[in-house]
Image: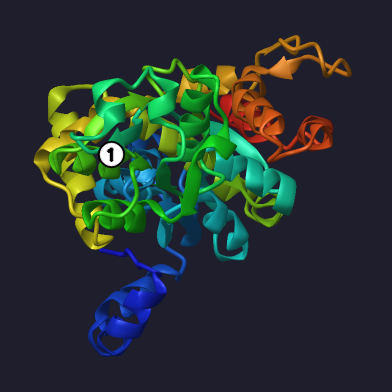
Amino acid sequence: MKRRLLSMFMVLVLGVSLFAGCSSSQSNLSDKNESVAPVSAKDTTFGIEPFSSRQELRVGYFAGSALSIPFYIADNEGFFDELNIDIKYETFTNGPGMMEANADWDVAGAGSAGVLVGQIGYDTPMIGISDYETNQGLFVRADSPIAKDPDNPENWKGTTWLYPVGTTAHFTLSTMLGKLGLDDSDIKSINMDVSSALNAFIGGEGDGLAVWNAFAFRAEDEGFVRVADAGTLDIVNSSGTVATKDALENKRELLKKSFAVFYKTVEWINENEENKEKAIKYYLESAEDEGIAVDRKIAEGIIDYFKCPGLDESIKLMTETSKDPKGLYTDRELLQAEIDLLVTMDFFIEQGKFKPEDRVKILSQKLVDPSIATEVKAMLK
């Protein structure tokens, strides 16, 4: 398996053994970089023309989330290999941290908050929608007053919540507070990545927990009570596929073919029960590699919750337009993907986390970039 986990802890602990024990894998990668005889598009799974020599795509991989799993499945099923594409993984546990390290990857998947951080802080364009997440959960202990009466705002006031600040978990928590007539100032927030937050909550710290995906299912397995989530709060919570400007300029053909493979793999997952079963097993394997404790029940839930569109729908989201629903931006019509992303953007503007001019920047600089989707549509005609 070609995967490389880049957690600093793992690098420190396993660095020597990786250096000593992975010479075969490194040799294989070196061999693959040599020019090989190409096959035609008709010989590949999705009818995509392969490269004539090996290419490397660096993927920012979101640990524990389904929004990156099509990369992993396509890699292990050989969909990339048959195109002469090698995948190198850079693993992260939250979107903002991923965006800060954007020099380490070419393409990545992140929640809407992470996508926005990348666009505003690092000018990294979103090139596609990778999920519509609903499994962003809010949890309390069974004996909490909130568990007994979650609609009573008095039960929430002064409570301490553990979650990664500035992420979609934060968005979900703030939305719930707003529904109760409260805001972030009515609670105490402790900023932690989702893994640390869950472990701290298990250890007795805090009154509430906001986490996503595998960590949300684990929280339920620990007996914590789910009092709300993005689904019950009816939040449009889009995740995005993001590319660096350097990759868009210098690895454009690689991005186009990888974009097509990613979304075609989503269709492959949903094609039949056999493929879905493989996806569950690959998710379990991926989570194990990343040190995330999940079981089959959690993996099934993750894949069932995964709402990434297929290729045709993804292209529509990135090319079909309509007016800004809020009427704030009038220079042009907006892509549907822009409109969906702005749900999170507008919320964080109301919260004071972003500024109105940040919204204008994303739209005026076209940091939701439809060009790859448009070119892929033409490529596959």
* Relative depth, front residue between 273 and 375: 273
Image quadrant occupied by the N terminus:
bottom left
Image quadrant occupied by the C terminus:
top right
Q: Position of residue 51 (x, y in %)?
A: 49, 52
Q: Where is residue 220 in the image (x, y as percent from the top left)?
A: 19, 36
Q: Does residue 48 appear anywhere in the picture?
A: no
Query: Which residue has dot 1 on it?
Result: 216
The answer to whether residue 294 is left or right of residue 66 is left
* Relative depth, front residue between 48 and 218: 218
Label 1 CA crowd tier, 10 Å (few <14, some 14–19, many 20+): many
Name the residue: 73% across, 45% down: 120
Name the residue: 35% across, 68% down: 4
Q: Mark 1: which amino acid? A: Ala
Q: Residue 5 falls in which quadrant of the image? A: bottom left
Outermost residue toward the right? Answer: 331
Name the residue: 35% across, 41% down: 208
Examine the rendered structure and indicate whether residue 176 appears above or below residue 65: above
The answer to whether residue 291 is left or right of residue 185 is left
Element marked by disc 1:
helix
Colouring used for the render: rainbow
Q: Residue 159 falls in which quadrant of the image? A: top left
